[in-house]
Amino acid sequence: MAAPMEVALVTDAAGPLCNCAVWELRSGSALPGYRGGNSGARGLALLGGEHLLGAQLGKGYIGVWELQRKDQLQQKIICPGLVTCLTASPNGLYILAGIAESIYLWEVSSGNLLAILNRHYQDVTCLCFTDDSSHFVSGGKDCLGLVWNLYSTLQAEPSEIPDPRHVWSRHSLPITDLCCGFGGPLARVATSSLDQTVKLWEISSGELLLSVLFDMGIMAVALDLSEYHMFCGGMDGSIFQVDLCAWPVQRDRAFQAERENGKVFRGHRNQVTCLSISTDGSLLLSGSHDETVRLWDVQSKQCLRTVNHKGPVTNAFIALAPANMFNADSKPAVPLPKFSKHLHGTESSDDQGADGVTLRLGIDHQRAGESYLEKADRLYSQMCSTREKNLMGDQEQLKIQVTELQDEVSALRKINKNLFDFSARLITKSAK
Amino acid sequence: MTKKRKHQEDFQKVKLKVGKKKPRLENATDTNFKTKAIHLPEQLKEDGILPTNNRKLNIKDLLSQMHHYSAGVKQSALLGLKELLSQYPFIIDAHLSNILSEVAAVFTDKDSGVRIAAIRLLQFLAPKVRTEQIAPFFPLVSAHLSSAMTHISEGIQEDSLKILDILLEEYPGLLTNRCSILLKNFVELISHQQLSKKLKSREKISWMLSVNPNRRVTSQQWRLSVLVRFKKFLQALVDGSSGLEEDEGVQEQKENSQSMRNSVCISWKEHASNQQHIQLYENGGSQPRINSSFRLRSLVNVADSVEKGLSSAENLKGFIEIIIPLLIECWVEASPAQLAAPVLGNLLEPESQQLMQQVLSIIYLLWKLTKQHDETHKMETWLRMNYLADFKHHFMRHFPYSLQETIKHRKRDSYKSTKYCMTSSNSIDHLLLNLTLCDIMVSLATASTLQMDSDWLEMIRKFVTETLQYGCRLNCKQLNRLLGVTWRLMQIQQNKVATETLIKAVYVLYQQRNLLFPVRMLLLKFFSRVYEKEELSTQRIRSRSKVLTRWLTGLPQQLALLGSRNPELSNQLIETIHSAASRSNKELLESFQATASRIYDPLDGTLVLLPAESQQRLVQLVYFLPYLPTSLLSSLSRCCVMGRMSSDLAATLIGILHVRSSFAAWKCQVQDNSVNDVDYFSFLFSTLIGFSREELTSLQSIRGKPHISQSQLSPVRLYLTDLDQFLHHWAVTEVVCHSLSTIPSRSQCFDILQNGICKYLVGLAVIPDSTAGSILCAMSKLLDQACILSENLHKFLASCCYSLLYFLLTLDKEDAEHLQKRDTLWGSCISVLALVPRVLRLMLQSLQVSRVSREELPIIGQLLRLLMQHGQLRSHMVTSELLVQQIVKDIMTLKSGEVQEQWLTDLQYCFNIYLAAQPQGPSAISTGY
């Protein structure tokens, strides 16, 4: 496949048979879905292109599939409560889950629970990483948006609760969705809220850049990759497009009603729950409570495809298709460890032995390591074979070799003696 | 001959006779006129010639006179200049540089009269010249000023302070730019004396005391007046350099507004209609925008302020090192220990106290300046190290100053009745003095040094609590500072016991009944700040202040009691409640729940009384209510329909309730839904109806034309609502219909609605037109194949439809109010008729023409015609063709005897076109006519 293929991953609240449906974005051809369980809203995440995580609806665990094995759940991460939202860092090293008022942070490589962040006063509704995994943003029912620096949360002492980098408290009703733009720590974040506004913030300064007031609560928000447009899904099923870069163009204003339609996608009959935009910014995927997923052409605002589901759509997002998804023989480079339920620091008293740092090499390194061992093996066998050959052959070579080695030994001894003399001289001198 | 005769005529002799008047000579001059003088007070002056004052001196003359050796001439020149400039203000602009340079030059004149005149002129000039205008000349002016300040003659020094006053008043920014020189001058003004004291040690003081006791008084007064100016100057410096730095006290909101400044707030509607554009990225467009906040300044200023001003921490430290010992000496001289000695006159007292006040406020301002630097902490430790001991020794020894002084006043009053006694104003001054001292001292302490400072902190705490407890007469400014000190104290000592007493003291003050509004506002802000702080810390230590909790739980009740008396205060209350509610503070939520019925009362609750912005916050608060009982929902629905809330806000409220209901959540999710489904439905239903049961029953008795529209064929009479009410109701209806349509099990929802209508509306004789319309609208939106309508409902809908259609067709063309209803009502009728053919059939069946008066016949005809013409309805009309045919026939027979009117021919034509064209049985009718 030459061009990168994009797939849509969709889950709904009804189907335990087919938890996560997957279809190719452009053609609409369905790919085999993932079975088992029932993922909750904002509870689906791709981990490092190898695993798919799904927070179970109404149950306290996260289901894990390996991307190539679609028939059943491979692992369950047991959580201390209902998972309200879930996300994985783009570099595949950390998993975040919102459980009631707390945010849980796991390290993927070791399975340790590294931090539990308690700064929200009510349930956490949404979590989002920046594209370089350096920061993450959380939004909650307490109307607060918090920006965290991942590494400073990790460095904090276990006794004290790490402080978020910014606290955004300008919303007056619960935050329903978050979307993080491009640019790592310089990115902009859009938050949508039931208070009928969508606000755009800057992570670097923590300032509010833009606030758009709608006439209904907004349930989902998405930014396209170039941040030309912001898409906001409303409670009544309309999706609004806000142009972020528009110069006032003089045009006659005869057809205002028509013009307004030019910025609204109409079609859903119930609240929009999730929005996602393809990487080229031309297609918009939206899921709704009316049990449909729609694919829209952004330019013309037309609905390209409607997929019916059996229950309200909980997640729908567009992702670049990971290779593992199609290659049934592939295997994740690293098997997922068992995720611990207890905070890492406190648990360490139990097993003192495992105090050292566990190091897992990345994919590339690991492959190199294996081949190195193999190479060493091969070389060794080669050497042995030559040795054998030599043994079988004439003895003279052996003698020559022995004398060479003896010479070398004597040379080494000489060097050693010199070294000894030199250091002895130094020591005695300093003693004087 | 003729020539000769002519000649004779020319020289005719005039005969004069005695007694006759002498004839007039031809060449006589008539002297019979009177002269009048034309007085020209001044020459006509035009180009080049300058206006003059009363003494005929123009600006150039006056300015040149300033160089005259005689003081009198100079003085009169200054007076003349003032007069001239007040007459011709335009001269100021033209000659500003000359005027300023001349006037500034006489700041240092030896003659006091000249100086006074110059000061007056400056006083007159300053308000008329803007800062930008004077800025280029300011270096000159300030140079003259500083030379006057450092002048050897005392008179000139004194007058220089007056000049400084004027300049500080008008151009604080310019003056603070040159602070390095001026600060030095200030120091010299007082330390000149101090220095001389130090050099000659005792001699000078003794000399002053011995020779002229009044002299010392003057020196103290002098010091006072210098310090007053110095304080003003520092104040300007602090104000100017700290745009964002706020008083530590209560106002913290400013910081938020700072960040608000550059955020763009727009509303979607305007954006969608292309009226408002977002340009989020500053240089994102085709042209880069140039609005830099940097300004080029003249080089002189830059060099000055950067090098020597107080802007850098080092310079500030150096200056503090110079000034504070001086200030302490001033203090010592004026301190009560000396005053207590009986030698000194009592009249000194207010002055010395003022001096003390000035000293303290200067220190306070310096402290404020130190806080603007980055390494605040380092600075604070430095200050603490150097000055704490001195301060403790001098300032804190007699700390609560008010008591001693007032007692003394009273004593003095008793045996020496002086008219200077201003006890009332003084007591306030004492408070200010004490507060400033507290401010200074408290800022020296930190949490880490608590152990060492406990003795004097205890004194301050005692003072603060006492002042707060008896502080009902405090004004706003005092309270602000007092609360600032309190806040800092609480920061320093974070254990619960200490803070609790302080909070309690504030709470006692808060509970006073007749507080001024700004005072209450301050207290409220203080409390909410304390609360926020506590929220942050209690995550670690789960211990809440009891007083604070009590305060918090009292808030909803206060809100309910406040009503509409003070919207600003209510707004603050709502904000605090909101922040506590969003953090799910249990106690607050409980008390909010308890008072909710009063706040959301539809008649006189806070919700309907407050202005729109506060209403919005209140509506949003509904989301956080832990439990929404039936009664609350019913009053909310009344609030929605009564029109005292805008329809947008009603829509918001319905949206919020929808979110709270079980229908918005995920099905499987276990959630304790606080809104009962039954309650939710009844809320939606009564909002849809728009009228309470009592209102409906009271409507039944209304009769008569202007309010009621009635047809003979339908049992339902329509009550005509006002347009405002109608539009509001319609807007609400649309929202309700939408939230009804999002409920997953459509048919059950429909059944419930149907039952409601059957129970409450069927059987009523009078129904408001908006209600009828909204029911039809809801029906058409909700109806589904799966839904089954009951017979009753069919009939009711049919009669509603007919009544509405009749009302629409009989509408007066001029009736602008009702005409606006036409489209919406027509649309809802048609959609129901198109969706449910049976309703159409029933309606047609009810048109029994024989029972109808002659006036209604044309209307029925028109109605039938319109129904037949309508595209959606045509097929249904075809299926019930026989009925239509019967009606048309009846009409024909009734009208057969008369002349055919236009409507009748129209009807006939339509019938023939639309229905008779169908294959089955059209012939019978067409043959009939």
Image: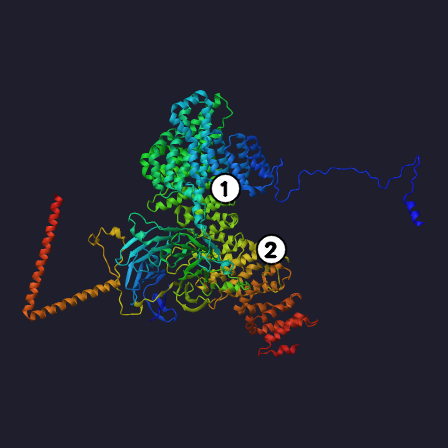
Amino acid on which the number 2 mark rests in the picture: Ser
B105 horizontally vs A150: left or right: right
* Picture disc at residue B534: none
- Residue B725 visible in the snapshot: yes
Q: Which chain carries label 2?
A: B
B89 relative to B631, above or below: above
The residue where tag 2 is placed is: B701
What whole-number distance in Å separates the C-alpha atoms at marks 1 and 2?
Answer: 85 Å
The residue where tag 1 is placed is: B137
Where disc 2 sits, the SS reads loop
Residue B709 picture quarter? bottom right
Q: Which chain carries label 1?
A: B
B718 horizontally vs A20: left or right: right
- Residue B469 visible in the snapshot: no
Instruction: Indicate the position of residue A90 as horizontal and vertical percent values.
Output: 33, 60
Q: Which of marks 1 and 2 is nearer the N terminus?
A: 1
